[in-house]
Each structure stands twice: as structure tokens, then as C-alpha cells.
Amino acid sequence: MAAIAGVVVLDAYASPIILAGLLLWLSAGLAWGWGNVCGVRGWRVGFVVVLAGALTSLAVGFVDDSPYLRLVPVALAVAAVVMFLLQLVRRGGRSGLTEAVVVTSAGLALVGVGAGLVGLSRAQGGPAMLAVAMGGVVASLATDAVVVPDRWRSWLVPMALLVGGLAGTALAVVLSGPTWGAGLLVGMLSGGVAYAVRDVIRAQPGATALSAQVTAACASVLSVGGLAYVAALIL
């Protein structure tokens, strides 16, 4: 996951179009194990998530004027229509229909939130803010290495917030972009959200499989895209 976060930052400084291509790659990584992690078998979940990633990448990759995410709802709407059409034409009755729709919709939501990564890279001071957010995500990995009894696991979330905030503050000072207060806030929230996403996925059956681990890494990075974008607009 740290490598993914590093590539996100490098692409943000290099070109938004390259970062849009990475968004598609992250969506494919998310789709690889998303259905199995959530207990829904079959190819439909992964197909729709990858389709959403492709359409969203196009929707943000070639929009160079504000608002940068204006076509993202259109891309997700098309993917949602395909999701329902695939459920309508499938054979074998409607067993598991609700679960499949909920799981696929959650995947679409993560892709949509991840589009904020590309939008942020186009905003003024966006790459620096994105670096701060990714710093918080990477710092939260320290929380994964802590082994505590189950009754104390709730304390790991504040720990992720703490280390994420420290990393975000340090990067904000070094990059001379966001203020240290913005770095602290974005780092804390990014670290906390990324850890929470991974913790939820780890609790699912089959979380030790390679596909599930790739899914967790991609979901952690995607989940902070919208958060960092909104923070850059407000702060």
C-alpha cells in the first residue's frame, strides 16, 4: 500500500492524465477481490467496478477546468445502469440480489470517492495536499503492526489518527504547501479512514487471500480521495 500511495503522489506531480490511468488500475485492484471479500460470488461485481473505474478515469482525465469532477456522476450512473441490467438478465432466480446490489454499489462509491485524487491533482496546491493525505495513509500502516487484545482494538483508531496527523503535519511543513493545521487535519482523517477501511476488510472471511490484500490496499488509497479534495477546497 505504501508503494501505491507513493505512485499516487508521483503521478499527481507528473500529470493528471497519468493519475487518471492509475485510478483505473486502482479500480481493477479493488474489483479483483471486492466481491469475494464481501461474500458475493460471480463476475458481475468485479466487471461493474472495473467499468466504473474506466468511465470515471475518462470523466476526470480530460477535464481541465473547474469543476473537475462534474462528469463523475454521469460515469457512475452509467455503471449503475449496467449493474441493474446484469442483475435483470441473470439466470437462477433472484437469490442474493440485494447483497449483490449493495456490494456493487459500495464498490462504485469507492471509485467515485477515488476520483477526488485526480481532481485534487489539478487544483492549485493540490499535489502537496495529496502528498499530505498519502502520508497519513502510509503512517496508518504502523497501526497494523500493533497486536493488542480484542477488547483494546478500539484504541487503534485513535492511534491511526495520531500517527496520520503527525505525518501530515511533517509533510505540510516540509513541502511548504498546506498550513501545518491543514496538514494535521488532513493527515489525521486520511490515516483514520484508511485504517478503518482496512480493518473492516480484514474482519471478512478470506481476508488473508492475495486478492483481498490487494483490494484492501486499493480501497485504503481510494477512500481518502474525496476527503483530500474537499479539504483542499475548504482549507
Image (cartoon, helix red, strand yellow):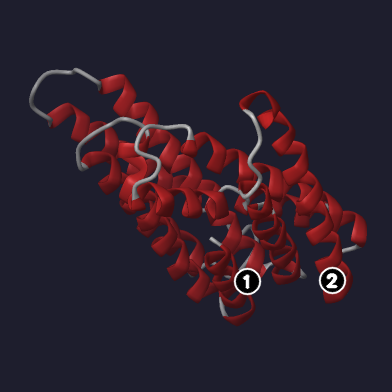
Q: Residue at x 51, y 62 (%)?
A: 60
Q: Secondary structure at mark 1?
A: helix
Q: Is residue 35 visible?
A: yes
Q: Secondary structure at mark 2?
A: loop
Identify residue for label 2. 177
Taking depth in this image into account, of 191 and 94 the one nearest to the observer is 191
Q: From the viewer's perspective, tell me whether residue 29 is left or right of residue 135.
A: left
Q: Quick one: which residue is furthest to the bottom in this view?
A: 14
Q: From the viewer's perspective, tell me whether residue 177 is left or right of residue 147.
A: right
Q: From the viewer's perspective, tell me whether residue 98 is left or right of residue 67.
A: left
Q: Residue at x 76, y 53 (%)?
A: 164
Q: Residue at x 50, y 49 (%)?
A: 219
Q: How many marks?
A: 2
- Give, as a three-letter code, the residue at label 2: Gly
Taking depth in this image into account, of 166 and 173 the one nearest to the observer is 166
Q: Are marks 1 and 2 in contact (CB under 8 Å)?
A: no
Q: Earlier in the sequence, mark 1 or mark 2?
A: 1
Taking depth in this image into account, of 120 and 31 the one nearest to the observer is 31
Q: Quadrant of residue 155?
A: top right
Q: Is residue 7 above or below residue 231?
A: below
Identify residue for label 1. 9
Which x, y percent locates residue 167?
79, 60
Q: Is residue 122 above or below residue 184?
A: below
- Give, as a three-letter code, the residue at label 1: Val
